[in-house]
Amino acid sequence: MRFTDKVVIVTGAASGIGLATAKRFGSEGAHVVIADLNPAKAEAAAQEVKAAGAPDAWGSACDVSKEDQVIATVAGAMQKFGRLDVVVNNAGLMVFKPITDQTADDWNRILSVDLLGAFFFTKQAFLNMKPGGAIVNISSIHAEETSPLVASYAAAKAALVSLTRSSALEGKPKGLRINVILPGAIDTPMLWDNPNIKSGVEKINPADVGKPEDIAAAIAYLASDDAAFVQGAALRVDGGRLDQL
């Protein structure tokens, strides 16, 4: 197993892609930290990850937009497990509004979670990881091709790709690898709650909808030694959907 005795933090891991990712790492031997805004859901997810085969899992209440809470989660992982090997920056928010209706508060909320949260965890990873560690950021195909009503989300996800490149440059001398995944349409509540999907503005071919486990597999690859020579890469995992947009 690729992650035996490794310690992995996954943000936004109480459901969807995050939970599938936590289970994947746990199934490959990792001790998993479930970092999620809702403490009850974080603990429930930790129990689910352990039941799925993880040697251990810990639920940490964490608002990734608050640097003190990110510091506390990383400190808790170090205290409980003694090391940190992988961080998956998965937590994200969307708001659906025309640009003319969006406010500074809307943008600050999205950027704080989707971009600053990844920065805060990257900073702590740089301060605590030993050589061989990895960070995998979760962006979106909206970073490259987007649709109406999601300007703040698309901008944040594009910026996350840029943060990945900068982090990879600074992480390489530390022996750390940082890469980013751009998921397409994935079968999660975030997809089906999208008003563009509900209204038909954005068409979804069922053949283009992936499973959370598809993204989890790609994340596990980038975090593993199998990707030892992959640094600063943006991996699109969308079933070819972006080629058709």
Image (tube, rainbow, N blue to C red):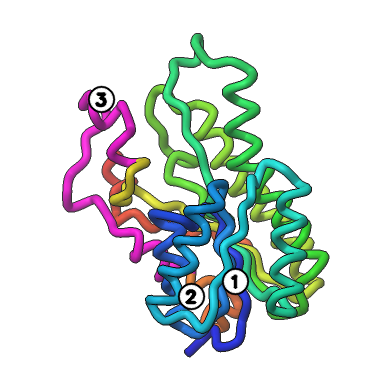
Q: Of the two numbered discs 2 and 3 on the same chain, state the one appearing first in sequence.
A: 2
Quarter assignment of residue 108:
top right
What stretch of residues is rendered in magenta? 191-219
Would you call the spot at circle 2 few (<14 residues within 10 Å), some (14-19), or many (20 or more)?
many
Can you give x and y, in whole percent of width and height, for residue 224 in the image? 54, 79
Above or below for 238 versus 216: above
- Residue carrying label 2: 25
The three-letter amino acid code for the residue at tag 3 is Val
The three-letter amino acid code for the residue at tag 1 is Val
Can you give x and y, in whole percent of width and height, for residue 126 in the image? 78, 64
Q: CA distance from mark 2 to mark 3?
A: 36 Å
Residue 101 left/right relative to 84: left
Residue 220 left/right relative to 200: right
Which of these two is toward me, 150 or 73? Answer: 73
Can you give x and y, in whole percent of width and height, for residue 34 in the image? 55, 62
Would you call the spot at circle 3 few (<14 residues within 10 Å), some (14-19), or many (20 or more)?
few
Is residue 194 highlighted in magenta?
A: yes
| Observer able to see residue 136 | no
- Residue carrying label 3: 201
Q: Of the two numbered discs 1 and 3 on the same chain, state the one appearing first in sequence.
A: 1
- Give me the residue at 50% from left, 38% from top: 93
Is residue 83 highlighted in magenta?
A: no
- Give me the residue at 70% from left, 59% from top: 73
- Residue carrying label 1: 8
Task: Choose mark 2 or mark 3, whichever is in front.
Answer: 2
Secondary element at tag 2: helix
